[in-house]
Image: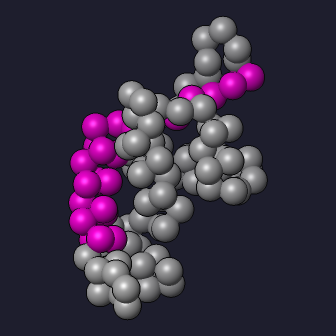
Amino acid sequence: MGHLHGTLRTRHGLSLLDYLTLGFLAEAEGGSAPVAELRAFLGESGDRVSYLLRGMQGLGLVDRRRVYRDRRNVRVTLTPAGRARFVDVERTANSIVRTLPGG
């Protein structure tokens, strides 16, 4: 995992958590999910996920919006740039995993 994290950082400027977030959203219906579901998937604190999403939003990879009818909840959506970046990063991750024993 350390090798994968380092390679993603070097080649794509993304962490392993960034990659997992992009993948989660790429597989979510409509490329969008509540932040609470993402937090549960990652197993990270709300503060950690908020920090992660703030950085990804700054890069234009995701968008965060409060839910119209329930302002306490936030949805995160994969942007077209985020989807394109995920395709690139997924290619790199798959090539690394194939080189591992049993990969």
Query: Which is nearer the eye, 58 or 4?
Result: 4
Determine the residue positioned at 46% across, 31% down.
32
Query: Which is nearer the eye, 97 or 25?
Result: 97
21 on left or right of 82: right
Q: Is residue 89 magenta?
A: yes
Q: Is residue 64 above or below residue 85?
A: above
Determine the residue positioned at 70% across, 14% down.
70
In the displayed image of the protein, which residue is found farthest to the bottom? 101
Rendering quarter of residue 102: bottom left
Q: Is residue 85 magenta?
A: yes
Task: Look at the image and tell me whether residue 51 can be seen.
Answer: no
Q: Is residue 25 above or below residue 15?
A: above
In the displayed image of the protein, which residue is found farthest to the front? 102
Instruction: Specify the principal SS of the magenta part.
Output: helix
Q: How many marks?
A: 0
In the rendered structure, which segment of residues is drawn in magenta? Answer: 72-94
Q: Could you say where residue 69 lies in the image, as x and y percent from the top left?
A: 66, 8
Query: Which is nearer the eye, 102 or 37?
Result: 102
Give the quadrant of the C terminus: bottom left
38 on left or right of 45: left
Task: Look at the image and tell me whether residue 89 can be seen.
Answer: yes
51 on left or right of 26: right
Q: What colour-coding does the image apply?
A: one colour
Q: Could you say where residue 85 lies in the image, as x and y percent from the top left?
A: 29, 53
Determine the residue positioned at 30% across, 44% down.
83
Rendering quarter of residue 10: bottom left
Q: Could you say where residue 97 lies in the image, as x and y percent from the top left?
A: 35, 78
Determine the residue positioned at 28% across, 37% down.
80
